[in-house]
Amino acid sequence: MAGILFIISAPSGSGKSTLVSRLRSLVEGLEFSVSYTTRQPRGSEIDGREYHFTTRESFEGMIAADEFLEHAEVFGNYYGTALSALRHAKAAGKDLLLDIDVQGAVQVMRKLPEAVSIFILPPSPETLERRLRHRSVAEHVTSEEVIARRLQEARKELDRIGEYRYAIVNDQLDEAVDELRAIVLTERQDGEADHKLARSCLTTSRSRRLVEALGSFERHVVAQKM
Ligand code: 5GP
């Protein structure tokens, strides 16, 4: 084992956080990279646990000093993965998981083509919109504009799904967790891996669930243009 880099990306509202925390409790030897960000902490977030919260000035200093594996601006804030996270995981003999957006993921794939990329998507635009509305109530941001912007952003991200090695349609949480675990164990060549399940998640496999989910987003766009 050791040294595999997993990249997970998902539009906000895909249910990624729950999925990733379930994975965390099921799979050993996986370190989670704590990103740097210039956004403000939310709710119960703690500096150094969810993110390293920092200022724009200090973030830009890190860019200038070439300290990032990748960085991107998401919803008006900087986010970045420090190269030190990679070194740290290697030294500890662990695999590393990055939870980053599409722009960052593409930068990492270019630099480290052996990285294992996984895209998590909601089953339909209707489910995504419902989840975004729930979340915005929880965050006390009920602006229609924010929801519309996140939906539009999700569609843009979905257009790049073909650049990822795997895709998981997060419809039933338990199934999605099984798939994520199968992918990690398969890439590790672990004897317990469910290779067939992992293979069905390859984006090149064009599974029925993936095709249906992508189709529902395309129809939604066409319907909106009419
Ligand atoms: P949030 O502010 O909701 O925690 O995250 C917003 C978005 O930023 C999510 O899509 C998340 O995956 C992405 N993100 C978090 N950390 C990083 C990072 O280090 N680099 C990049 N490129 N995106 C990140």
Image (spheres, helix red, strand yellow):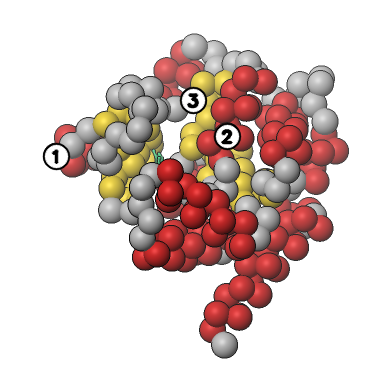
Q: CA distance from mark 2 to mark 3?
A: 14 Å
Q: Identify residue type, mark 2.
A: Thr
Q: Horizontally, is 145 left or right of 57 in the view?
A: right
- Location of residue 79 in the rendering, given as x and y in whole percent from the top left corner: 33, 42
Residue type at the position of mark 3: Phe
Q: Is residue 183 left or right of residue 80?
A: right
* Residue that mark 1 sits on: 57
Residue displayed at 22% across by 37% down: 59
Is residue 51 among what the camera can see?
yes
- Tell me the residue that label 3 is attached to: 32
Sequence order check, earlier mark of 2 and 3: 2
Residues at marks 1 and 3, CA–CA distance in whole angstroms: 25 Å
| Location of mark 2 (residue) | 18
Q: Position of residue 171 (x, y in %)?
A: 70, 48
Which residue ends up furthest to the right in the rendered image?
196
Name the element at disc 2. helix
Nearest the eye: 142 or 75: 142
Numbered-mark total: 3
